[in-house]
Amino acid sequence: MSLGALLVILVAAGDAQTVSSETVVALVAAAQSALPHETSVRLLAVPDPEREDLTRVEERLGARAVASLTWSAHPGGVRASLRMHVAGGGSWTARTIAFLSGDPPSERGRTVGFAIAALWPGLDVDRPPNVAPIVQAAAPARPVAADASTAAVLHTEVGLGVVGATGLGGPAGAVGGTADVSWKRFHTVGLRGVFELRGGPLAALRGFDWVIAAGGGIEWWPLSLAWASRGALGVYGDLLWTAHWVRRESSGDSGESRGRMLPAVDLGLAASLPVRSSFRLVMALGGELALGRTDLRTGDDHVVVATIPPARAVARVVLRYAF
């Protein structure tokens, strides 16, 4: 195979991911028609394309670029997930395309074929060329199929993990659990929601501080990790509503509790690493800034014995599942 070859790794695993021969024929025809004339397309079946080392396949077959394709079910249809690596430059690109259950197999193949061609290095595929349909009776392509280079990512990720925080200039150390959800509309940008509960002791008050935080924001994953397939570096930002629930233990009675609610912002950096096909580990380090501090007072004179600072450093480790 020449150095200008494109290698597509294709596999059908499970009933929901079965790729019909009609889809395969349309995929190869569309990709071949959109690529430069000196480029050839070859299919290679492997047990699990997501776990395949694409760089080794490049070296073994002398390919210019290698793309892996997997199919998965989603509510109302199927989803095609593409990864492509370009030899030499260390460039990784990913695309996810959602199809309805009623989309003809040939349309799915044509769309995926044009999407692969759009990832070819140095090739600008704004619109796929006019190619005769593989099956004459197939329904005309929808707009998303006619412009595969702008196909949207339509998937959701939910996560559970642990969180730890420490106050910057005061007592606010706490540990607890966190849950989040991310709605990916594009390949690198998603909307997110977060909820967490954490707690820690307040030595100056001989008490305990529980913190509930809930809100939402945005996350952006602009950098790929070449050494980790589907790994990425990103940033996130949230608007939160936080509630402190401080309890002081007293001898001879049941103690005393006080609560306070404050808005806050949460900003930080994150790294994402794949664990298996639908799971990834997200590690984040950032800062939380509440719009106000909380004074802790005791006695009849309400003497301030400590202050929960508005700024806190926060670290999270979350396991996410994509569907």
Image (tube, rainbow, N blue to C red):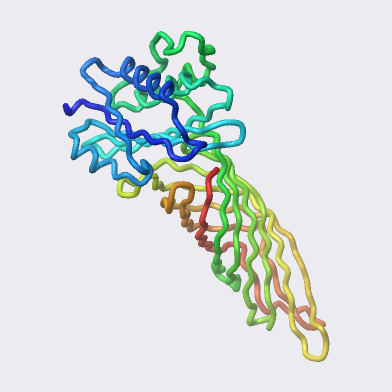
| Front in this rendered view, residue 304 or 323 | 323
Residue occupying the point 27% across, 34% down = 86
2 horizontally vs 81: left or right: left
Residue occupying the point 42% across, 13% down = 134
287 horizontally vs 194: left or right: left
217 horizontally vs 221: left or right: right
Inspect this view and state whether residue 177 appears: yes
**Vertical order, 209 against 300 (above or below):** above
Q: What x and y, as percent, mark residue 50? A: 38, 43
Q: What x and y, as percent, mark residue 215? A: 66, 50
Question: Which part of the image, by quadrant, shows the C terminus?
Answer: top right
**Vertical order, 33 against 208 (above or below):** above
| Front in this rendered view, residue 184 or 98 | 98
Residue occupying the point 69% across, 67% down = 294
Residue 125: which quarter of the image? top left
Q: What x and y, as percent, mark residue 223? A: 38, 43
